Every structure is written in structure tokens, then in C-alpha cells.
């Protein structure tokens, strides 16, 4: 989705803004733009279709300088991804870049057009620029005009705006779209995400919905939705800026796959108590009185986070014996869900900004549920709006395809299942201890997988030209099959379907012939024999079997065309291990095909539109 960077300070800011935009590229975009105040009353603007490198090329041909500016990468919503629709947009003295959707833009556009204003783009953003410019006529200053405009706007926005008439100011506004503010001794920054400016400051302020801010070279002033000055706490971000770099890996996705052992240790750190066979979740603000009465958990999420939620259902229902519903966030709010004060609604989201998940969380809250989130991005909107938070600590995930965020989600869900089971007395200390030991063994098991990538490269060579893949799994491996298929579609553009193995004979078996690779996820679990029977049915129809099995498997590995061996681990943590295997299959197929792995076409990292 779109990304914004704003700067006002002492230095020539074009390189700072372009570099910041580069750090936001992971969000997914299709055009880019830059506006810089060359002199107090001259604003220079360039825009380009496609990748940021196109914008940089234009800039290098005719560079310009200034110490106030804003930049933008756009993921098209209203209007095609053309230069004319790229941000920043200009109206009179106003220059503006925006992330979000203005829902009543057509009404505003007609109104402004009837007052004689002319529009050059098809975007909702240009309407905001005109609206602010028209409000300037009756406003004290730019900030006042922005506030007057906001009172007429419906929708989500995070924007940075400047005016040639106020050369010492940048104005920022936020509602239901991310925006962080940073400051060092020389400058003030506004950005859609921390990595954009992390090399310049570690101190960040997170705006609330409805907030506006005025940035000058000397100070940052924040105002709440009523326009009253307000203090928002400053947070010190501990990440190393380098953790958002590729560090020699060919792609961010590969780097993030390899980071999983360390990130899982980070997720577990300080939260496991082996002696007591229990989990320490003091940070999760759910009191005993609520836990005693909770009678249903609803987990809401999208995409990969949704598949993590499905694994979570197996873990929580199986061991804490609380009924768990799993809902696609985009469906939840429209299905009139049954919710009361005894419902715990858990939103799972890497970014914490996914619009569908946020809307579902708000719906659950409105209906009376207690809310919680499992989230990676600290201070994200979903984290801030949940009653309780369990952070995954996966660090910044840059590749669009989620990897380390999802395995750490599974670890977080495992901890939650143990914690609930121990509190509900459905799990003994001994059981808790065994599960914790299994979780602690996961990083080593993943390292074993990562030490031998040859089988994945072989699969890539043999099957990259396939038209379609089928992924099969049973029990907690069924969501892994769905996740494997999603990952393959996302980054290799090969069609893939995930199916519960037992369901294959009810339809998809018709697709199987000698051209169909079938990834059978079959570790040695309670349903292993059943899975083997289903795979044999596929084999009998000439399907090409890629079997993910435990080391020493003497059954499926005899009939499979390709065997991927994974270490033997406790059944409760098997999905974490098999996730890594399906990630590697898609990564190496996509790499073989030469697709844009970190920024696949049409996709965005943080989907902030419904
Ligand atoms: O940030 P979220 O976890 O809320 O994102 C949800 C999905 O958009 C996300 O998992 C998406 O499916 C990924 N690209 C999967 O790799």
C-alpha cells in the first residue's frame, strides 16, 4: 500500500526522502513522486510510473535541492497507476501526499468542481489537496485549513501536506492509516513506517486517529481530534537499522526465512517457565475473572495470519478445551456474529494495520467481546485498539510474503494455548513442560532444514513449469497446505490449491494427472496413515508426489517422486517446521522462474483498504 515520507530540517532532503521511500518499497506500489521546496516559494515536483528507480532516474538527470519536502509511493486505488495519478498532488499553493481512501471524494469533487476547481487526476487525493486549498481562504494558517478540511472528509488517511505560503511548516494528519513522527537534533520526519527514517532517529511518536501535527525545524506540535494540543509519548525503537537490510541475501524473503530460528527465540524469550510447565504472559492484560468465564474464542485474520489462526484452533481447542471459531476478517463483520461479554476475540496481524482485520476487531469490541491481538508491529493500530496484546517480536518483515511473522505467530499461539490450558486446568504442569521443551527445540530443527536446501532447488528445477500445484494436509497440517499454496501463488504466480487430504476425493481428484505436482505434508502425526492413503489415491492417478515427511520415513518416501525430510519434533510444534518447508518450496520455484520475489505484482505488504 502507499507510503509517505516527509522531512523538514537543515539538510538537503531529496536523498533522505528517496532513501526513506526505498525502505517503504516492501509495502507494494506502482508509481512514485517527490516534492521539494527549492526556495521558500518554489516547489519542485517530479513523478513517475512504476518503480522508484524510474523516479530516481528523472531526479538524477536534473537534481534539485531543498531542506523541506515529501515523497510518496502509490498503490493505485482510484485511477490507474500513471504519472498523472501519482502523488504528490498540487492544488493552488498546496502539495500533498496521502495514504488511505477518501470515501466521500466524489461528493467533494463535485462540490469543488461546481466552485470552479479543475482536477487533473482521477484520484481521491487530489480532492483533499483542493479542499485544503479552498479552506485556506478562510483559515488562519495551513494547519487550520487542514483541520477545516478534515471535518468534511470521510475515510482513512495519513497525509503530509505543505504550502508555498508557509515555508517553515509541514502538516501531518492521521486517521485509520499508519503515520509515525520522528525527530533528531537537525530535523523532523513523518513516515508511514519506522524503517523509512530509522537511520536518522530512534525516537518515535505514534499519532492517534484524528490527530494532526505541525512539524517545524525546531519543534513538533501535536493536536487531538478536537484540535487541542496534546502530548503523545515518545518511544525508543531498539531495532538495529541494519535489521531492515538484505545483509547479503539475494532476497528479503530468503533472509527472513533464515532469521526464523533467532526470531522464534526472541518470541519465547522471558515467557517460558520450564519448572512450572507454564507460560509467563504478565504483559497480556486478561484478568482471572474474565478467563474463568470465557466460553468462546473467535480468531479473526487475513491471508497467512488466517492460516496461523486455523493452526491456533487445533492448539487451543485441543489443549485448553475452549471452543474456537476462526473467521476471515473480511467476512466476520458482515455475518452478524454471536458475541457477548464471555467471548474473547483475537485478531492476528503481522502489520497490525490490515483494514479488514481492524474493522472486524472493532465490530467484535462493539458487540461486547474482550479483544486481544497477536501482532508484530509495535504500536500499530490493531495493537493500540486491543484490550490485550501479545507481540511476536519477529522484527521488521520486509518481503511481501510473510515467513518469520507467521512462524512466530504459531509460537505465540502455542504459548497462548499452554497459558490458557494451565489456567483452565486442562493441562498438567508435565504436559506444559513437554510442550515448552518442544518449542525450545524448534530453532534447532529449523536450522537442520536450512542446512540442506538441495531438495528445494531440485523441486524448482523439476516443477517450475507446472501450471498448477495441489497441497494436501490433514489436521493441523491442513492450514499448512493452505499456506503453502498461498505462498506459491503469491511469489511464483503458479496456481495452487490447498486441500484437506481427506477432501481431495470429493472434487479436486478430477484435476490430477501426470502433470500435477502434489505436495503431501505428512509428518508422523495422529493422522499420518490416513494422509498416506489419500496420497496413494493421488499417486494412482499419476500425480507427481512431493512428500514432506519425517526423517526415516519408510512409507510415503518409497512412493514419492521427491522426498523432503524434516526433523522429528513433538506433534504440537510440527506445523512450525512444515511451514518452513513450504516456504522454501515456493521461494526456490519463484527464484528459478525469476519473479519479483520481494514485491510480487499487485500485492501490498500492509493492506490498509477494505
Ligand atoms: O499484516 P497482516 O498479517 O494482517 O496481513 C494479512 C495478509 O495480508 C498477509 O498475511 C498476506 O496474505 C501475506 N502477503 C501472505 O504472505
Image (cartoon, rainbow, N blue to C red):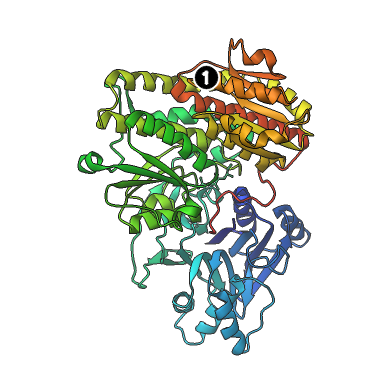
Indicate whether 440 appears above or below 23.
Answer: above
Q: Nearer the viewer, residue 496 or 119?
A: 496
Q: Position of residue 390 (x, y in %)?
A: 37, 40
| 369 displayed left or right of 192 | left
Q: Position of residue 204 (x, y in %)?
A: 43, 52
Can the viewer see residue 583?
Answer: no
Which quarter of the figure is the N terminus placed in?
Answer: bottom right
Judging by the rendered image, the residue that carries numbered circle 1 is 445
Secondary structure under badge 1?
helix
Can the viewer see residue 544?
Answer: yes
Classify residue 293 by image quadrant: top left
Residue at 38 percent across and 40 percent down: it is: 324
| 254 displayed left or right of 48 | left
Indicate whether 478 appears above or below 109.
Answer: above
Q: Nearer the viewer, residue 145 or 553?
A: 553
| 294 displayed left or right of 512 | left
Q: Position of residue 47 (x, y in %)?
A: 71, 64
Classed neighbour count for the residue bearing mark 1: other residues with Cα under 10 Å, few (<14), some (14–19), many (≥20):
some
Quadrant containing ligand 1 reads top right
| 594 displayed left or right of 426 | right
Residue at 56 percent across and 75 percent down: it is: 105
Query: Which residue sits furthest bottom?
Result: 115
Q: Nearer the viewer, residue 184 or 330?
A: 330
Amino acid at each position: 500500500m502507499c507510503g509517505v515520507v516527509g522531512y523538514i530540517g537543515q539538510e538537503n532532503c531529496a536523498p533522505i526522502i528517496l532513501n526513506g521511500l526505498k525502505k517503504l518499497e516492501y509495502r507494494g506500489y506502482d508509481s512514485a513522486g517527490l516534492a521539494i521546496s527549492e526556495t521558500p516559494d518554489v516547489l519542485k515536483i517530479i513523478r513517475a510510473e512504476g518503480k522508484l528507480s524510474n523516479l530516481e532516474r528523472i531526479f538524477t538527470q536534473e537534481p534539485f535541492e531543498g531542506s523541506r519536502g515529501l515523497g510518496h509511493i502509490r498503490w493505485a486505488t482510484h485511477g490507474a497507476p500513471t504519472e498523472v495519478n501519482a502523488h504528490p498532488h498540487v492544488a493552488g499553493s498546496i502539495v500533498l501526499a496521502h495514504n488511505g481512501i477518501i470515501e466521500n471524494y466524489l461528493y467533494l469533487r463535485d462540490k469543488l468542481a461546481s466552485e470552479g476547481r479543475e482536477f487533473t487526476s482521477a484520484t481521491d487525493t487530489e480532492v483533499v489537496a483542493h479542499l485544503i486549498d479552498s479552506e485556506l481562504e478562510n483559515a488562519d494558517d495551513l494547519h487550520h485549513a487542514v483541520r477545516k478540511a478534515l471535518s468534511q472528509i470521510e475515510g482513512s488517511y495519513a497525509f503530509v501536506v505543505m504550502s508555498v505560503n508557509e515555508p517553515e511548516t509541514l502538516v501531518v494528519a492521521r486517521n485509520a492509516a499508519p503515520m509515525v513522527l520522528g525527530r533528531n537534533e537537525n530535523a523532523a520526519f513523518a513516515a508511514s513506517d519506522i524503517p523509512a527514517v530509522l537511520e536518522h532517529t530512534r525516537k518515535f511518536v505514534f499519532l492517534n486517529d484524528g490527530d494532526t501535527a505541525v512539524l517545524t525545524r525546531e519543534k513538533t506540535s501535536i493536536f487531538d481530534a478536537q484540535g487541542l494540543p496534546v502530548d503523545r509519548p515518545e518511544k525508543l525503537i531498539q531495532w538495529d537499522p541494519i535489521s531492515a537490510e538484505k545483509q547479503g541475501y539475494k532476497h528479503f524473503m530468503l533472509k527472513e526465512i533464515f532469521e526464523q530460528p533467532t526470531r522464534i527465540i526472541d518470541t519465547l524469550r522471558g515467557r517460558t517457565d520450564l519448572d512450572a510447565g507454564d507460560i509467563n504472559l504478565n504483559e497480556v492484560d486478561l484478568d482471572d475473572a474474565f478467563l474463568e468465564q470465557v466460553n468462546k474464542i473467535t480468531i479473526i485474520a487475513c491471508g497467512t495470519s488466517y492460516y496461523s489462526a486455523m493452526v491456533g484452533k487445533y492448539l487451543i481447542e485441543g489443549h485448553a478445551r475452549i471452543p474456537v471459531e476462526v473467521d476471515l476478517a473480511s467476512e466476520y463483520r458482515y455475518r452478524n456474529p454471536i458475541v457477548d461479554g464471555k467471548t474473547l476475540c483475537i485478531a492476528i496481524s503481522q502489520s497490525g494495520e490490515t483494514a479488514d482485520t481492524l474493522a472486524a476487531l472493532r465490530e467484535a469490541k462493539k458487540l461486547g467481546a474482550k479483544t486481544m491481538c497477536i501482532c508484530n508491529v509495535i504500536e500499530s493500530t490493531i495493537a493500540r485498539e486491543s484490550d490485550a496484546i501479545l507481540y511476536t517480536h519477529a522484527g521488521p518483515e520486509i518481503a511481501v510474503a510473510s515467513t518469520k511473522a507467521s512462524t512466530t505467530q504459531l509460537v505465540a499461539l502455542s504459548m497462548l494455548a499452554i497459558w490458557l490450558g494451565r489456567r483452565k486446568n486442562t493441562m498438567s504442569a508435565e504436559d506444559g513442560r513437554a510442550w515448552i521443551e518442544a518449542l525450545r527445540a524448534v530453532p534447532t530443527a529449523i536450522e537442520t532444514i536450512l542446512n540442506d536446501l538441495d531438495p528445494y532447488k531440485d523441486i524448482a528445477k523439476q516443477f517450475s513449469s507446472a501450471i498448477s500445484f495441489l497441497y494436501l494436509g490433514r489436521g493441523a497440517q491442513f492450514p499448512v497446505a493452505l499456506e503453502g499454496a498461498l505462498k506459491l501463488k503469491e511469489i511464483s504466480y503458479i496456481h495452487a490449491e490447498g486441500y484437506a487430504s481427506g477432501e481431495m476425493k470429493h472434487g479436486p481428484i478430477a484435476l490430477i494427472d501426470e502433470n500435477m505436482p502434489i505436495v503431501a505434508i505428512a509428518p508422523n502425526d495422529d493422522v499420518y496413515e490416513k494422509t498416506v492413503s489419500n496420497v496413494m489415491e493421488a499417486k494412482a492417478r499419476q500425480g507427481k508426489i512431493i512428500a514432506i515427511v519425517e526423517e526415516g520415513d519408510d512409507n510415503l518416501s518409497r512412493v514419492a517422486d521427491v522426498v523432503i525430510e524434516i526433523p522429528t519434533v513433538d506433534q504440537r510444534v510440527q506445523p512450525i517446521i512444515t511451514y518452513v518447508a513450504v516456504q522454501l518450496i515456493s521461494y526456490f520455484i519463484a527464484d528459478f522462474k525469476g519473479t519479483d520475489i520481494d514485491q510480487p505484482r499487485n500485492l501490498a505488504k500492509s493492506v490498509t483498504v477494505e
